[in-house]
Image: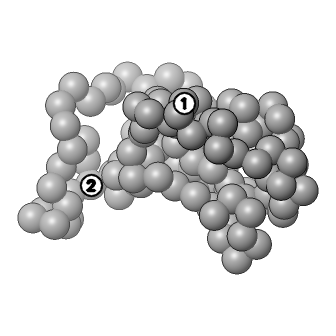
Amino acid sequence: MLTDPGIRAVVPPWGGETAIDLLPLFDWERLRAAEPTWLVGFSDLSTIITPLTLLTGAATLHGTNLMDTPYRVLERLLSWLDIVEAPQGHRFTQSSSSHHRSTGWDDYAAVPEVRDH
């Protein structure tokens, strides 16, 4: 997906505790030559985001995974959607969140209108 020019962003549903096992499988030269595609995520996905940026120069986003995207963005934070849609050169500021999730995920199939953590 990261080398397909028709795909503009890859947003995994959640982290990936085995993401480190994927690193030897990446073709870094091919990724470096490809048109950049946004990779968005946090937690274990940082294992992929960091070398992708350092080894290819591609911009990545430390932001919510797909499972957190439907939630309203908390005050002081920006949605990754705001960042990727911003014009080139746009400046933004955000601060640490004052809220932290301590339990699992909401059941979007059962309660699709959920918007608050």
Mark 2 = which residue?
Answer: 115
Q: Considering depth in this image, is 96 or 10 the residue closer to the camera?
A: 10
Residue 42 visible in the shown view? no
In the image, what residue occupies the spot 84% across and 42% down?
A: 56
Q: Which mark is residue 12?
A: none
**Badge 1 density bin: few <14, some 14–19, many ≥20, Cα 10 Å:** few
Mark 1 vs 2, N-terminal side: 1
Percent of width and height locating residue 74: 40, 39
Quadrant of the rendered image containing residue 91: top right
Image point 55% across, 25% down: which residue? 95
> Residue 11: where, in percent of width, then height?
52, 55
Along the viewing direction, whichever of 105 and 18 lies nearer the viewer: 18
Q: How many marks?
A: 2
Q: Left or right: where does residue 27 sit relative to residue 94?
A: right
Q: Which residue is mark 1?
A: 20
**Residue kind at label 2, given as amino acid type:** Arg
The C terminus, quarter of image: top left
Distance between the alpha carbons at the discs numbered 1 and 2: 31 Å
Q: Is residue 13 left or right of residue 54?
A: left
Q: Secondary structure at mark 1?
A: helix
